[in-house]
Image (cartoon, helix red, strand yellow):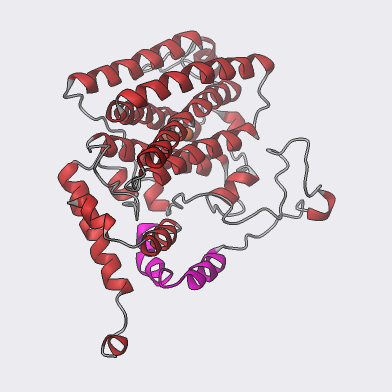
């Protein structure tokens, strides 16, 4: 039923409505709907919606090369600003703090396998990197230096190593899923039901996390070698796993994202408690100010909150997709996404909720794109 209702939509309806909806958060739904009437109006509004951010005095476009830069990450040309990426949410302050650490209960044997694999990967990574993850520190009297030496706290460099490795891996599943679904659509000559874009958006979002944190630490040759090896193994494993069971793969990513939310929650708590003094009042990297539309004086702490909210979105989306039939069901997030007050406090939509959400989206679209009464009477 869900699939039928999506297929009824014309290509123009789907393409432009999806683009317009996903440029904004749910709270901007009404405005987004106005962008869906024609191709030209949509494009105009997209341009208008791109905020012109204040530039710092160090921004000197003329002094930077335009086409080629030796380090494209840290020398992002200032003329490349605005909507140069796929849809991603821009969060309000209360949304950023609406995130809760949640867990999807593993009910089926496949859920248990997915959860077990994630727990095993996390434990192995913690062991290899010498990180202990206790709920309570061994002694309240230990100083930051002592806790770091004993492996209970990470310093800024260790946090960045951990984040760079994790983000380089986290960008893989969305791209694999999108690639395989894209090829399936071509091969079987049938619509994809809206999953490809969401998977691509996730992959790009994770890559932007990596690009952001890359500006804070130059990875060593050893770290690059670890990432290369991990990517080589993980990409192929995930590729073949997704061929066998997309549902288990989305559940696996859902559990992986649960761990990401835990990791960034821990990082934020440490920073706010003064346990990462190197990052106190550290300014947000320029690329992150542009990407998340942060204020010009944003701090690294604001970036961590935004990244954690992104991971929460991935958690919610993947656990929800894992509750659906990947061959026949429409992606409920193809047209819009709930805001963080839902995604941060609810682990996933079950299948009934997903169907209700799609129906609600279609009702909203139908209301907004209906021609005015005077045109109807002609
Ligand atoms: Fe990430
Ligand atoms: Fe993620």
- Residue placed at 57% from the left, 22% from the top? 161
- Residue, far right: 63
Estimate the x, y position of residue 372 in percent, counting from the top left: 31, 83
Residues drawn in magenta: 25-49
Estimate the x, y position of residue 249 in percent, counting from the top left: 33, 27
Quarter of the image with the C terminus is bottom left
Q: Which is the main secondary structure of the residues drawn in magenta? A: helix
Answer with left or right where residue 264 lies relative to residue 344.
Answer: right
Which of the pair 140/17 is nearer the observer?
17
Which of the pair 204/238 is nearer the observer?
238
- Residue placed at 76% from the left, 55% from the top? 57
Is 161 above or below relative to 189? above
Q: Quadrant of ligand 2?
A: top left
Q: Quadrant of residue 216?
A: top right
Estimate the x, y position of residue 47 in percent, counting from the top left: 57, 66
- Residue placed at 72% from the left, 49% from the top? 77
Answer with left or right where residue 289 lies relative to residue 169.
Answer: right
Estimate the x, y position of residue 92 in percent, counting from the top left: 42, 54
Magenta span contains residue 45: yes
Q: Quadrant of residue 158?
A: top right
Is 227 above or below relative to 250? above
- Residue placed at 64% from the left, 46% from the top? 286
Which of the pair 353/370 is nearer the observer?
370
């Amino acid at each position: 039923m869900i699939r039928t209702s999506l297929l009824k939509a014309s290509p123009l309806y789907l393409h432009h409505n999806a683009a317009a909806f996903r440029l904004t958060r749910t709270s901007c739904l009404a405005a987004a709907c106005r962008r869906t009437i024609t191709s030209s109006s949509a494009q105009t509004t997209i341009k208008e919606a791109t905020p012109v951010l204040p530039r710092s005095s160090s921004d000197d476009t003329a002094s930077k090369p335009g086409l080629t830069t030796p380090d494209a990450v840290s020398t992002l040309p200032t003329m490349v600003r605005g909507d140069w990426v796929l849809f991603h949410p821009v969060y309000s302050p209360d949304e950023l703090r609406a995130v809760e650490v949640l867990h999807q209960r593993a009910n089926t044997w496949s859920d248990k396998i997915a959860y077990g694999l994630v727990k095993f990967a996390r434990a192995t990574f913690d062991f290899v990197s010498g990180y202990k993850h206790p709920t309570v520190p061994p002694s309240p009297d230990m100083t930051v230096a002592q806790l770091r030496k004993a492996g209970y706290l990470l310093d800024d460099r260790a946090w960045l190593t951990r984040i760079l490795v994790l983000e380089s891996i986290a960008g893989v599943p969305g791209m694999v899923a999108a690639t395989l679904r894209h090829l399936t659509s071509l091969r079987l000559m049938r619509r994809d039901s809206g999953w490809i874009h969401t998977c691509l958006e996730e992959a790009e979002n994770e890559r932007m996390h990596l690009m952001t944190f890359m500006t804070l630490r130059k990875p060593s040759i050893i770290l690059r070698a670890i990432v290369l090896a991990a990517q080589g193994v993980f990409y192929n494993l995930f590729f073949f796993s997704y061929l066998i069971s997309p549902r288990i793969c989305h559940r696996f990513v859902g559990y992986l994202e649960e761990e990401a939310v835990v990791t960034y929650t821990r990082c934020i708590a440490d920073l706010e408690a003064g346990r990462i003094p190197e990052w106190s009042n550290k300014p947000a990297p320029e690329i992150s100010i542009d990407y998340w539309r942060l204020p010009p004086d944003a701090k690294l702490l604001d970036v961590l909150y935004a990244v954690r909210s992104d991971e929460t979105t991935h958690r919610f989306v993947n656990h929800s997709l894992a509750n659906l039939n990947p061959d026949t069901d429409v992606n409920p997030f193809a047209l819009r996404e709930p805001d963080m007050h839902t995604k941060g406090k609810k682990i996933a939509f079950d299948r009934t909720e997903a169907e209700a959400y799609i129906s609600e989206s279609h009702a909203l679209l139908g209301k907004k794109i209906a021609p005015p009464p005077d045109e109807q009477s002609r």
